[in-house]
Amino acid sequence: MSTPPSPPGAGRADGSSVRIGALVPLTRPGWVEAGRHLLAGLELAVGDVNEAGGIAGRPLELVVRDTAADPQRAAAAVDELAGLGVAALAGEYHSVVARAAATRADALGLPYLCSSAVLDALTEQPTDWVARLSPPQSRGWQIYADFLLGAGHRRIAVAAQPSVYWAAGTRILRDCLAPRGGIVIELDMSALSPAAVCDELVDHRATALLLLVGHPDPAVPIVESVRRDQRLAEILIGAPAGQPEFAEWATSLGDDGAGVPFLRYLPERLSPLGARVEKVLRERLGEAPSFVAYEGYDTVAVLADVLRSHGTDRARTAESWPRVAVEGTRGRIQFSRTPGIGVWQWAWPPVQVVDRDPGALDLFRVLHAG
């Protein structure tokens, strides 16, 4: 596994730098576009830290490893990075991969600040070594269920692939919808073609279809098939996991990709820091930064604050999570213990339900906020 070049001013790996290990999906089958945004945010923050004097005069260095959405590869990377002497771990986008990394970090006594994975059970048992910036799936998907009910949807189909993450999402939706008269109709995408999905939607009289599947395949063919079926002209297509956030969605689907509500973790207005970061990231990425890029930046901002205040001892870093109070790009970041969540959790990141504007695919409409 190779290490991409360090960002400007990050220092050389000669023992003088403070090193943070970064786990990022940079190759398929990982969500490469999400990984690119996450890495851009991480790197920009490292550059900002070093321009401000680093960590007690020592440069901060990012040591990047590509997880490729592979839990075993991620766990091996954690072992390697721990052996390289990193002060802490950062990053990861895929929930199942982050869970493997968190489990290994906990076993090794290596502090890990998870940037962007939402699976509630990030570790099997409570741990002091792991903290998380992104909201747990149970919070975000409950807000999404509230949106669906508010929009009048009671018969909701989920096209799902086999996965711990998708299964957890389905369970959360059912638990939220059932007490209020909603039903969840499960469509097994290991057995159904996109055309068969359309028939199932008609047979079950579903008014909404949620894509609990990978992108681009089978998400794109499913959307194309549903959009072209005149029987389903009124159905809402939704993607709570955020597939439409990235430009690749609009490129793949064009107008068919508009009006598909998804979850993103941004406030109504970015902080002053967030506005500055947005401008720089837009220039670097050549497009509007996603919420994942801000999560990357905030991860390093938090870790840098901890390392400045408490030094690079791993145990002291883990002990400092409850004392964090950092102004991030999306608000003030503090960690606490949350019922049912075994890691230190930012409670709460902003959550929005948004979609791409049918009149301008590069613009987003905020439909609901929680």
Image: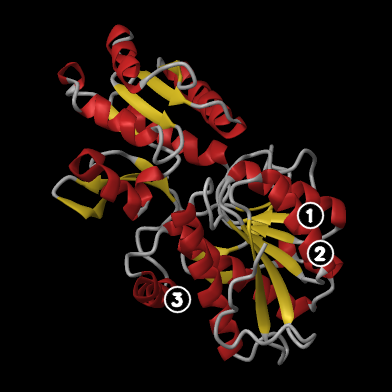
For this orientation, the residue located farthest to the front is 1
In the displayed structure, 205 sits above or below 2; it is above
Q: Which residue is mark 2?
A: 82
Earlier residue among tags 1 and 2: 2
Tag nearer the camera, 1 or 2: 2
| Marks 2 and 3, how far apart at CA | 31 Å
Q: Position of residue 8 (x, y in %)?
A: 55, 85
Alpha-carbon span between mark 1 and mark 3:
30 Å
* Residue 79 spot, x, y in % from top left: 81, 58
Circle 2 packing at 10 Å, graded few (<14), some (14-19), many (20+), is many
Measured along the vertical axis of the image, is residue 309 above or below residue 367?
below
Q: Residue at x 51, y 76 (%)?
A: 44
Please rate how many residues cluster around mark 3, counting C-alpha atoms within 10 Å: few if below 14, some from 14 to 19, many from 20: few
Q: Specify the quadrant of the image occupied by residue 341.
A: top right
Q: Position of residue 110 (x, y in %)?
A: 81, 61
In the image, residue 356 sits, relative to residue 148, either above or below, namely below
Circles 1 and 2, Cβ within 8 Å, touching? The answer is yes
Which residue bears the numbered disc 1?
105
Q: Which mark is first along the chain, 3 or 1?
A: 1
**SS of the residue at dot 3?**
helix
Query: Disc 2 marks which amino acid?
Result: Ala
Residue 304 in view in this figure = yes
Q: Which mark is residue 238?
A: none
Question: Depth-wise, is mark 2 or mark 3 nearer the camera?
Answer: 2
Amino acid type of the residue that numbered disc 3 sits on in the rendered structure: Leu
Considering only order in the chain, which callout, 3 or 2, is on the residue closer to the N terminus?
2
Disc 1 vs disc 3: which is toward the camera?
1
| Residue 213 found in image quarter | top left
Q: Residue at x 42, y 38 (%)?
A: 240
Label annotation for residue 273: 3
Quarter of the image with the C terminus is top left
